[in-house]
Image (cartoon, helix red, strand yellow):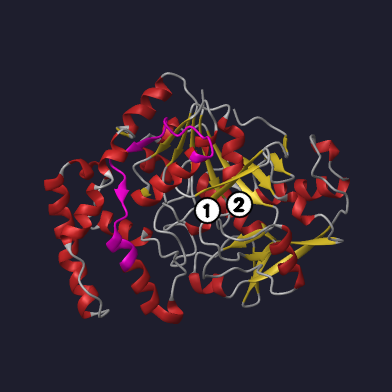
Amino acid sequence: MPALVLLGAQWGDEGKGKATDLLGGSVDYVVRYQGGNNAGHTVVVGDQKYALHLLPSGILSPGCVPVIGNGVVVDPAVLLSELSGLEERGVDTSKLLISGNAHLITPYHTTMDKVTERFLGKRRIGTTGRGIGPTYADKINRVGIRVQDLFDESILTQKVEAALDQKNQILAKLYNRRAIAVEEVVEELLGYADALRGYVCDTTLLLNDALDQDKVVLFEGGQGTLLDVDHGTYPFVTSSNPTAGGACTGAGVGPTRIDRVIGILKAYTTRVGAGPFPTELFDEDGEKLRTIGGERGVTTGRDRRCGWFDAVIARYATRVNGLTDFFLTKLDVLTGWESIPVCVAYEIDGRRVTELPYNQTDFHHAEPVYEMLPGWSEDISGAKEFSDLPKNAQAYVKALEEMSGAPVSAIGVGPGRDETIQINSFL
C-alpha cells in the first residue's frame, strides 16, 4: 500500500487540511512532519468547521491514527488546548501519537521571536511570533529541548540552563529585557509531563512497521513549497522543510518508501507575511478574491495577500517536490470573472523567463506576464464530475494542468468535505 506526501505547492494556505481530511478515511496514519502551530488548516465536516493549528488533519477521521513527527516543533500549551477544544466538540483524540524526538517551544522561544522581529523594524520577516524559528535554531545549535526531556527533570533543568545562559545575556544587554528564570521555565514544562506522557512513543519505529504491514501512511506538510527554508523565497520563509524531502527527515522514513507526492494548488495565489509576490493584486480584483475566498489566516488571523495563479511557481513546485498529482482547490472562488489572467512567465530587466529565478534580486524585480483565459458565471459548487463543470472552467483546469507539469487529480469546488471532484484516485 502507498506512502503519500501531501504538501502545499505555493506559499501555504492552499487547502491542505481539506485534502488531507478527504483522504483521511482511506489512510491508516496521517503524519505532520514539520512546522508548528504557525501552520493552520481549516477542515469543514458537514456544518462543522474545525481550525487545526498543530494537530494533523487526520485527527478528525475516526479510523485514522494522527501522528506528530520528530520534525515538528511543539508548543505544549497550544497542543493541550487544541486537544481539549476538540474533545469538547466530541472528537476522539486518544489515538494521537507524538514523537519523543520532537522539539518543544518554550516561553523563552516566543519571547525571543517577538523581540527579535520587533527589533528588525522594516526589515522584519513577517514571523507569526510563536517561537517557531528560535526553536528550530536551538535544535540546530544543539541546545534544544525535546518532548522526551519532560520526563527527566535533571536533564530538562540542565538543558534549560544551557539555553538560557546565552539568551538571558541577549535579552538583558541587547534588548533591555529582564532575564528569564530557569526555575520558572522548568516548572512550567514539567507541568505538561503527565498530560503528554501517554501520547509519546517512537514514531519512527511505528511508521516503518506500519509500512512494512502495508498500511497507508499520509505525510502532511505545513506551510508551502515557497516557504521552505532551503527552496523557498529566502529569507521570507519558515524555518523547516515543507517540501517532499522534509517528510523523510521529519518522520524518519527513507525516500524509497514514498509512492506519490501530491501538491495542493489554489486556483489563484495567496501568501501571508512579507516577501516577493509577483502576481499580487492591489485593486478590486484582489479584494474580491480575499472576500469571496475568505482569505484570512487560520492561525494568524491576518488578511492574506491575493493574486492571480502563477504557473512559474507551480512548475517549480513540481520540480523540487517530484509531484505526481495536483489537488486544485477553490476553483469556485473564480466564478463570475469574465476573463481570468494566469501568469505564464516573468519579465526581468527586459528578459522573459519561464522558470523561477534562483537569484533573489531577480525574483524581487520579476513582473508577471499574463495570458487571459475565459471565465464562467455558472455556480459550480454542486459539480460532482469534471464534465459537470462549465466548458470554460474545464478549459481553465486543463490549462493550469499543462502549465504546471503534473495532472490535476482532484478539484475543490466549495469548502465542504463533499464539495470535491475526484478525477483520479490518490491511492
Residue 410 in magenta?
Answer: no
The percent position of residue 121, horizontal first and vertical second, equals 42, 80
Identify the image quadrant of residue 139: bottom left
The amino acid pointed to by label 1 is: Gly
Identify the image quadrant of residue 198: top left
The amino acid pointed to by label 2 is: Glu
Query: Up-down: is 45 above or below 283?
Result: above
Query: Up-down: is 393 above or below 65?
Result: below
Tell which of 409 and 282 is nearer to you: 282
Extreme residue in the top direction: 213
Extreme residue in the front direction: 88
Tell which of 178 and 412 is nearer to you: 178
Please state the extent of the stretch shown in magenta in the rendering: 88-111
Query: Up-down: is 423 above or below 363?
Result: above
* Crowding at mark 2 (Cα within 10 Å: few <14, some 14-19, many 20+): many
Residue 322 seen in this snapshot: yes
Residue at position x 60%, y 60% from top? Answer: 355
In the picture, measured across the screen, residue 175 lies left or right of residue 81, that is: left
Q: Which residue was labeled with disc 2?
A: 14
The percent position of residue 86, horizontal first and vertical second, equals 50, 41
Kindly report the distance in space between the C-alpha atoms of the residues bearing marks 2 and 1: 8 Å
Residue at position x 25%, y 76% from top? Answer: 177
Query: Up-down: is 336 above or below 86?
Result: below
Image quadrant holding the C terminus, namely top right
User: Mark number for residue 23?
Assistant: none
Residue 75 seen in this snapshot: no
N-term mark: 2 or 1: 2
Check if mark 2's residue and mark 1's residue have beta carbons within 8 Å: yes
The percent position of residue 302, horizontal first and vertical second, equals 56, 65
The percent position of residue 115, horizontal first and vertical second, equals 34, 73
Q: Which residue was labeled with disc 1?
A: 224
In the picture, measured across the screen, residue 265 lies left or right of residue 82, that is: right
